[in-house]
């Protein structure tokens, strides 16, 4: 499930990415199996919370290590956070429509952010 190519070589970051993916897969499974809304919303919340926690940790690491792309990297995190909070809000208002879109956006973003930005900026 967690491919080698996905690793960036900073152990705590890799562990957190793995955890994020686990929650994403759990969310996808909940949709496919038609789990109830309450369970789905709970997993969305877990993912949003964990993602924000991960961003804070990553940003602190960049500051501690004096890594050069901090500002730009943080801006990407902030934009994404804003977007998923918006989607989460939409989902709470319209329970049916949002699930697939939410998962697609989260998956695409997480994977491309890790491959393109975390890999480049965290070492
Ligand atoms: Fe990351
Ligand atoms: Fe990042």
Image: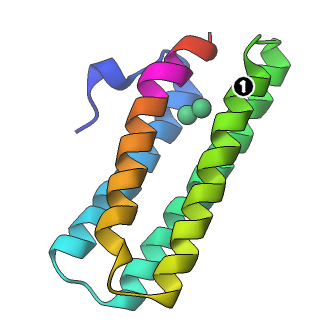
Which of the pair 18/79 is nearer the observer? 79
Relative to residue 51, is residue 33 depicted above or below?
below
- In the visual, does 101 lie left or right of 50? left
**In what quadrant of the picture does the C terminus appear?**
top right
- At which x and y percent is residue 99? 34, 72
Which of the pair 63/98 is nearer the observer? 98
- At which x and y percent is residue 82? 66, 57
Residue stretch in magenta: 114-119
Total labels drawn: 1
Q: Which residue is the site of mark 1?
A: 72
- At which x and y percent is residue 30? 26, 73
Which of the pair 33/77 is nearer the observer? 77
Residue 18 visible (yes or no) = no
Relative to residue 31, is residue 103 depicted above or below?
above
Q: Secondary structure at mark 1?
A: helix
Where in the image, quadrant-wise, is ligand 2 located?
A: top right
Relative to residue 71, is residue 89 depicted above or below?
below
Residue 56 is covered by the magenta coloring: no
Residue 118 is covered by the magenta coloring: yes
- Going 26% across and 63% down the picture, which residue do you hit? 28
- In the visual, does 56 lie left or right of 9? right
């Amino acid at each position: 499930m967690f491919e080698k190519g996905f690793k960036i070589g900073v152990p705590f970051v890799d562990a957190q990415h793995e955890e994020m993916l686990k929650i994403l897969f759990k969310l996808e499974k909940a949709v496919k199996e038609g789990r109830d809304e309450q369970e789905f919303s709970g997993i969305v919340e877990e993912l949003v919370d964990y993602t924000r926690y991960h961003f804070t940790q990553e940003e602190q690491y960049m500051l501690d290590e004096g890594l050069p792309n901090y500002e730009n990297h943080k801006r990407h995190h902030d934009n994404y956070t804003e977007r998923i909070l918006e989607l989460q809000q939409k989902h709470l208002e319209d329970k049916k429509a949002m699930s697939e879109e939410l998962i697609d956006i989260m998956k695409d973003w997480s994977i491309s952010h890790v491959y393109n930005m975390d890999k480049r900026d965290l070492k």
